[in-house]
Image (cartoon, grey):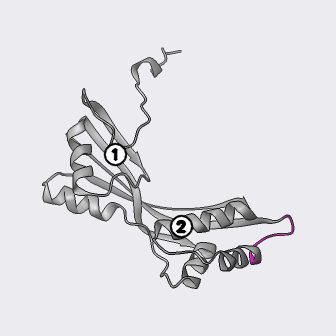
Amino acid sequence: MGESLLHKLTFEWNTWSDFTCEPMVDIIFSSMSPAFSTDADFEKMNTSAREACIYLGWGGKRQSELLDEVFRAHGLSPKSPPGSDKLKIWLDKQNITYTKEYIEDEWTTLKSYQEAVDSMLWHLEINEKEANLSLVKEIVASKCDSDGNVAVHVSVGLELISWTK
């Protein structure tokens, strides 16, 4: 068997704004991170990588019966979070050639009543909407099974974008 490659990897846990790439890193990989959302973020990503950048982000689709119902009850239109479109615009402006792949996926997560309520409150908060707690609790309770759990089904479109230096 081959020698482990782990000794060749360096892992760092940090916010993107606090992260410094001194020295540069070989590859930057971002997966579903809201940290990469502005031209300055994309520029930092590009200049910090020696070899390549890989970005996995929202690709224009997020559907969830529970989340969509909570959003509509609060006067919000269900929508996909911002994602790969901003990066593609930035890459095009910089004349950087990239590859992209659209990926559709879906999953179901079993959450407790409280976990589901907390998740809905978080989604409302990040969308800058004040939550009606009793309404959220009522909607979540209507989705509970006999054990008090909620099956949260989500269907998404993601986009994998990569470019080499």
Mark toward the start of the polypeptide (2 vs 1):
1
Identify the residue under disc 1: 54
Q: Quadrant of the C terminus?
A: top left
Q: Amino acid at mark 2?
A: His
Spatial distance from mark 2 to mark 1, Cα to Cα? 26 Å
Q: Position of residue 63 (x, y in %)?
A: 54, 72
| x and y, in percent, of residue 60 in the image | 40, 69
Above-or-below relation of 138 to 26: below
> Looking at the picture, does residue 9 appear above or below residue 46?
above
Q: Is residue 3 left or right of residue 65?
A: left
Q: Which quarter of the picture shows residue 134?
A: bottom right
Mark sitting on residue 123:
2
As shown in the figure, which amino acid type bears the numbered disc 1? Ile
The residue drawn where x is 44% and y is 53% is 32
- Which segment is the magenta one? 142-147
Depth order, front residue of 143/2:
143
SS assignment at label 1: strand
Q: Is residue 6 magenta?
A: no
Query: Measured along the vertical axis of the image, is residue 41 above or below residue 155?
Result: above
Q: In the image, what residue occupies the spot 74% across and 66% down?
A: 150
- Crowding at label 1, few (<14), some or many (≥20) Cα neighbours within 10 Å? many
Residue 136 in picture, x, y percent from top left: 66, 75
For label 2, the crowd category at 10 Å Cα-Cα, with few meaning under 14, some 14 to 19 and many 20 or more, is some
Residue contact at pointers 2 and 1, CB within 8 angstroms: no
Depth check: give the residue in front, 21 or 30: 21
Instruction: Give the residue at x 37% y 51%.
Output: 35
